[in-house]
Each structure stands twice: as C-alpha cells, then as structure tokens.
C-alpha cells in the first residue's frame, strides 16, 4: 500500500499564500480565503490526477481552521477535509504479506509513518524540539502532558454557564458533576502551557459542562468543540485498530505500548476517573430537548432585522442536534477503545510483558463505570439506553451483577482472581429460586434488576448477529438463545412473585415479548 506523504515546494508556498491576510480587514474576505485554501488542498491531495499529500504546514493550517473556524461552513469543511485526508494518507496501516500464507487472511507488517503530521504529540521532548526547529508549529497540538490549549477554543462560548453547573458539596462526586477548575493565568497568547490541569480530559470536561447547561446557546464554539472531539477520536481509532488486528496474531504488547491511546492515558497528568465520569455524563445528560426547543423557537421568528444572522442560527440549531448525536457515538467509541486496551493490557500483565514504562494508570475503565453506576443508580437507565456497543454493554451488566453475586477477592497486579467467569446464563440462574431472587433484590432493588436483565438480553440479541464477537458471545453468554430466553422469562416471573406490585416499562415488555417469540418458534 502506497502512502505518498510528499509535497511539491512550489505548490505548498502558493497554497499557503491564500491564507495570507496581510492588509485584509473584512471578515468575509478572510472566510472566503480559508474556503479557497481548503478547496485547493482538496483538489491537489484528493481529486487531481497526480496526487500530492499536504505538508506539515498545510495540515496545521487545516487543523487551526477547524479549531477557530468562526462559521459553520468552515468548521464542517475543515473537519470533512481532515477526515478524508486521514483515509487517503494514513499514519499507520498494515501491509499485505508477500508470503503464500497471506491468502488465508493473515495480516502483514505494521507500517508507522513517523514523519507524518498528527494532532497529538506523543514523542519525546527532543523530537518536539527537532520538529519546532524544522518550522513545525506545535503550539496548538494535543500533547499528552500539555493540553490546556485545546480547552481554550471551547471556553469562549461556554464561560457564562460555569456558575450554573457547579456541583453541590458531597462526600463523593457523581458522574454528572464536574469539579471546578482554577483559572490558569499562564501565557494564553499561543505558547505551550504545561501544568497539572493541562490534559486531554479538559476537552471532554468542557463538553460535559456544555451538555449540562439548561440554556444551551446557539454559538459556533460548541460545533467546533464537537467536531474537534470526533476528529481526535477518529485519529485514536485509526491508530488503534491496525495494532489490534496484528495483536490478535502475534500477542505482542509492544504494539500497544507505542499506541497514541496508551501513551495518552498512561500520563500521570491525566485524571482518568474524571475523564470517565465526564464521558458518562455526556452519555447520560444529552441536550436534545434544549436544542430542539431552540430550533422550534427560531422557526417562528417572522420579523428578523438581521435575516442572515437568523438563518445562521437556524443552521446552527440543526447542526448542533446532529453533531450532539455524533458526539455521543464518538464518546462511546472512545470508551470502547479504552476498555479494549484495558483488556489487552490485562492479558499482557498476566503474561509478565508489562513494565513501569507502560504508564501509571491501573484501574480499568470497566471497573470505574460499574462503580459509578453502583453509586448513582439513577444513571443506569439513561447510560444503558445510549451505550449500544453490545460486547461491552453486556460486560458492564455482568460485572455489575457480579458485585452482588460473587465473593470478593484480593486482587494483585498479576492476579486472575476476578469475576470474569460470570456469564449471562449464570446471572439469570440466580433468579431461579425465591430465596436467591430475594437476596439479590435486597441489594440492588427489583427495578434495577429487571432493567439490567432486559438490557443484557438486548445485548445478547445484538451479539447473535455480530460475527466478530462469536468467540466472546459463546463464552460470556453461556447458553443458547432459547436457554437465555427461557431463563429471562423465569427471572421476571420470580421478580413478580417477590414483588406483586412490580410495574413493567414498555421496553421491558418488548424484551419479554421477544423472548416469548423466540421460545415459541423453537419449541
């Protein structure tokens, strides 16, 4: 596979000259010049007969346009261009093996284009210095140790909402609360800033703050923020998946030791629990109704003195509604990647392949999610409604039940004494008798129990149609679909006997109907 990351010097200078705003004061002219620049890069790198990959400076310029677009058109155009360039000029990819056995579907070698531009800085400080000496501006990129600059692009539109979303004092912060950050009076003029709060989680934290606001404002900053986050997750995923494919064949932990995600999360500067809580907060507290209300209000504005501004607000309202959905999907993808990394790291730990070089973080994301849902039971329903990845959705539910159905054990770094042997079939069996059902209900309540069971059944149905999880499905489900359906019906009968006043939601009735249908078809 070719990866032609080369550029013609003359083309670069001519294209970059389009962005020269010397003597230009009109904002519309600057806006048009940026669109012309994006179109020129698109044609040269994606549409011409002799393709030429953008240079570091050109990638930088596109990225900065996304971060400070000031218009919906520029934000969408720069995001779309960056996404297409990612696909056309990957930083990491697998080559096709030249060996005869490659016809069996085996992956080839992993190729990492180290000189390629990236929105993340994950190398050593020395490499950063070399890049700067070569004229590569790093001020605006996402450093795993210095990320405060990323948060600045979101604060302008949302600063007034901070006072409204400060959490109430409590002994333990909930997933919907975000600790207040002290203002950093450091150099905000473009230089790199370093400090404890300067990390990737700041981006997610500010999105969580925006979602919590009750008066979501129609401004461009949230659009830039959500597009930026979606793009960064795409970059992390593109770096992760080829390594995962090769790891399945080689079990080589070094592949992930050098991944962007592992380096990013391994930093001691990262407050990982806060990152998880912010991700869950975004998933649980979505702002559809606020955006839709703003959109409905805008539709009935008849006498607008500034028609162009009015039309712009309508476009923003529509865009925010769709982007908010896409952001939730991106948050789920990020959480899924982290949990997959945790699983792989656990395997490497058990085999003795990890060392202190692999970073500071130890508590897996799955455990933090389960702990947060245990402490904040009101978030179980909204979180599971939004989180749709079946493998990890089922795993979250199994781990939640395991906290109350298995004996706790002391875990060491290389211990395998965990509750990972629980299966859906085994969990359903705990509801087979009145005594065991009563014991479980005492700990988690009937409402939570039936909610978890129907979501587990939903994940089970989804896994039946997911070929890439066949091995996992057989291991973690623990029975045939007919057996699971039969035990689900029995479990609900036991719950109803234990609590005759137990009410069923429409979602739970649909799950039981599906289970009964499966049993009738296979009887």
Image (spheres, rainbow, N blue to C red):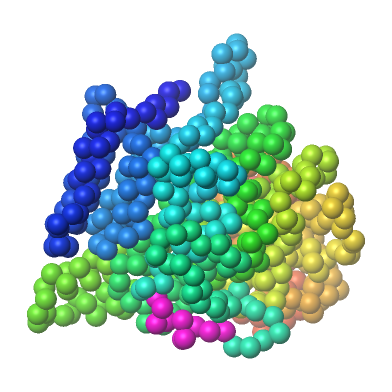
Rendered image quadrant of residue 198: bottom right
Judged from this view, the residue extending furthest toward the top is 100
Direction from residue 367 to residue 107 in the image, left or right: left
Q: Is residue 211 above or below residue 513?
A: below
* Quarter of the figure with the N terminus: top left
Q: Position of residue 415 (x, y in %)?
A: 87, 51
Asked whether 164 falls inside the magenta stretch, the response is: yes
Q: Position of residue 467 (x, y in %)?
A: 59, 38
Q: Residue at x 17, y 69 (%)?
A: 311
Rendered image quadrant of residue 225: bottom left
Q: Is residue 243 above or below residue 156?
A: above
Between 404 and 499, the one nearer to me in the picture: 404
Q: Residue at x 43, y 23 (%)?
A: 2
Q: Is residue 339 above or below residue 89?
A: below
Rendered image quadrant of residue 298: bottom left
Asked whether 269 falls inside the magenta stretch, the response is: no
Q: Which residues are magenta?
A: 158-167
Q: Residue at x 58, y 43 (%)?
A: 126
Between 319 and 60, the one nearer to me in the picture: 60
Q: Is residue 168 visible?
A: yes
């Amino acid at each position: 596979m070719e990866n032609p990351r080369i550029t013609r010097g003359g083309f670069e200078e001519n294209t970059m000259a389009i962005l020269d705003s010397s003597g230009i004061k009109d904002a519309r002219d600057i806006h048009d010049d940026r669109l012309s620049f994006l179109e020129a890069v698109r044609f040269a790198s994606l549409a011409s007969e002799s393709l030429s990959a953008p240079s570091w400076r050109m990638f930088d310029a596109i990225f900065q346009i996304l971060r400070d677009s000031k218009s919906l058109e520029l934000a969408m155009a720069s995001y779309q261009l960056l996404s297409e360039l990612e696909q056309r000029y990957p930083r990491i990819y697998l080559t096709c093996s030249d060996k005869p056995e490659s016809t069996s579907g085996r992956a080839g070698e992993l190729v990492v284009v180290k000189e390629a531009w990236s929105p993340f800085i994950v190398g050593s400080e020395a490499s950063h210095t070399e890049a700067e000496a070569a004229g590569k501006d790093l001020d605006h990129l996402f450093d795993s140790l210095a990320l405060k600059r990323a948060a600045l692009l979101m604060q302008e539109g949302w600063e007034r909402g901070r006072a409204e979303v400060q959490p109430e004092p409590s002994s333990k912060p909930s997933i919907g609360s975000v600790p207040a950050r002290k203002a950093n009076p450091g150099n905000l003029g473009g230089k790199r800033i370093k400090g404890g709060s300067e990390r990737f989680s700041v981006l997610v934290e500010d999105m969580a703050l925006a979602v919590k606001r009750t008066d979501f404002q129609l401004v461009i900053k949230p659009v830039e923020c959500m597009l930026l986050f979606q793009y960064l997750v795409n970059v992390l995923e593109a770096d992760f998946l080829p390594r995962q494919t090769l790891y399945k064949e080689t079990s080589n932990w070094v592949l992930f030791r050098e991944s962007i995600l592992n380096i990013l999360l391994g930093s001691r500067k990262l407050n990982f629990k806060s990152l998880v809580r912010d991700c869950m907060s975004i998933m649980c507290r979505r702002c559809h109704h606020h955006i839709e209300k703003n959109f409905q209000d805008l539709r009935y504005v008849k006498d607008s003195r500034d028609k162009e501004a009015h039309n712009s607000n309508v476009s923003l309202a529509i865009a925010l509604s769709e982007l908010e959905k896409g952001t939730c999907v991106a948050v789920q993808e990020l959480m899924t990647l982290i949990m997959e990394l945790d699983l792989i790291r656990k395997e490497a730990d058990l085999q003795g392949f990890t060392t202190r070089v692999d970073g500071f973080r130890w508590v897996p994301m799955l455990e933090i999610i389960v702990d947060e849902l245990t402490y904040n039971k009101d978030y179980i329903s909204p979180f599971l409604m939004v989180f749709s990845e079946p493998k990890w959705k089922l795993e979250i539910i199994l781990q939640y039940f395991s906290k109350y159905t298995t004996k706790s054990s002391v875990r060491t770094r290389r211990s395998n004494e965990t509750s990972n042997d629980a299966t859906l079939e085994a969990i359903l069996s705990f509801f087979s008798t009145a005594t065991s059902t009563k014991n479980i209900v005492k700990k988690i309540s009937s409402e939570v129990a039936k909610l978890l069971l129907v979501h587990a059944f939903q994940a089970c149905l989804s896994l039946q149609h997911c070929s890439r999880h066949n091995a996992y499905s057989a291991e973690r489900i623990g029975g045939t679909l007919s057996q699971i359906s039969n035990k689900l019906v029995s479990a609900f009968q036991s719950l109803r006997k234990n609590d005759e006043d137990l009410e069923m939601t429409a979602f739970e009735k649909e799950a039981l109907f599906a289970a009964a249908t499966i049993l009738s078809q296979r009887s």
